[in-house]
Amino acid sequence: MSRARLVITAVLVEGRGVREVARAYEVSPGWVSRLVARYREEGEAAFEARSRRPHRSPAATPPEVVERIVELRRRLVASGDDAGPETIRWHLTTHFGIDVSTATILRHLHRVGLVTPQPHKRPRSSYIRFAAELPNETWQTDFTHYRLASREGVEVLSFLDDHARFALRVTAHRRVTGPIVRAEFVRAAGEHGIPASTLSDNGMVFTTRFSGGKGGRNGFESELARLGVRQKNSAPNHPTTCGKVERFQQTMKRWLAAQSPQPATVAELQALLDVFVAHYNEERPHRSLPGGSTPTAAYRARPKATPGDRSNDAHDRVR
């Protein structure tokens, strides 16, 4: 029999005094009095331990904010956007004036089952990160394959600023060739200025240094040399060197997959890419940028590097 039941029996059944019972069971008279009063009010429930949770929690997240967090998560996932707690926090602060920590956002997402644990993923802190110090210090470039709704395979060429993650130029083509790379680079440089350097993999459209030739240059390489732009290429078997542009392409494809209807022609794909680039640059935060700013804000925040500027970032050691 529990101590509470013994105390109640001693007071109410045996008729013993509160102080006498308190001494006998080595508890305080006040506890005995409160227990008796609770038994008279609640009956058998008095023998169950009460929750110590406070009746009110002034620091608790308001229900309407929790609803906004959940709604943002679902909307961002449906649109193919990044929907992590940092991004949700940026939207809450920027568009609704709500200041909530990322830990709070993550806790509420867990409670409603909107987070899938991924214990196999490496923690972000384990990655060695490097980036250009100034806009236009280094442009990363790459192309990726995409299948239209008509099942035709096409390719998308991207130029991305290494410092700001700013999408400089993203274009769709039936096939990316050397002349196309050169032409799109010239157009990007005409709009955003000539970069100090470029970084790409060793694809033939970017470089001929592994082609077995006698040191000849393709059109892209010749244009870079003419403009005084330093060309950097990733070391063989080190694709993560160009990780920023490859991560951009993943984000782009995820966004495209969420669009309806899917593009059936190159022209329709280009129209969607133009919408995506504007959204990516202007309307969504980037977790790798200071303060989670947008690529456009980061690109415009500092003076641009120019040809001849030599950086000391880790990209220079990958060739």
Image: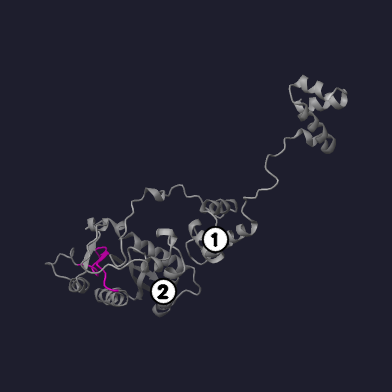
Residue 296 at x, y percent in the picture? 40, 69
Direction from residue 103 to residue 286 in the image, left or right:
left
Q: Which disc, if any, is residue 255?
A: none
Q: Is residue 287 visible?
A: no
Residues drawn in magenta: 193-207
| Residue at the (48%, 64%) spot, across then down | 81
Where 241 sits versus 181, above or below?
above
State which tag comes first along the sequence, 1 or 2.
1
Most foreground residue, 51 or 114: 51
Magenta: predominant secondary structure element?
loop
Name which residue lies at 43% across and 68% down: 280
The answer to whether 263 appears left or right of 310 in the picture is right
Residue 149, quarter of picture: bottom left
Q: Which mark identifies residue 73?
A: 1
SS category of the residue bearing label 2:
helix
Looking at the picture, which amino acid does disc 2 mark? Leu
Q: Amino acid at mark 1?
A: Arg
Q: Position of residue 34 (x, y in %)?
A: 79, 33
Task: Identify the residue position indicated by label 2 in the image.
Answer: 273
Horizontal side, residue 220 vs residue 248: left or right: left
Q: Residues within 10 Å of mark 1 (few under 14, many from 20)?
A: many
Find the distance from the CA under tag 1 to the CA under tag 2.
Answer: 23 Å
Residue 71 seen in the current view: yes
Quadrant of the snapshot with the N terminus: top right
Its colouring scheme is one colour
Residue 242 lies in what quarter of the image?
Answer: bottom left
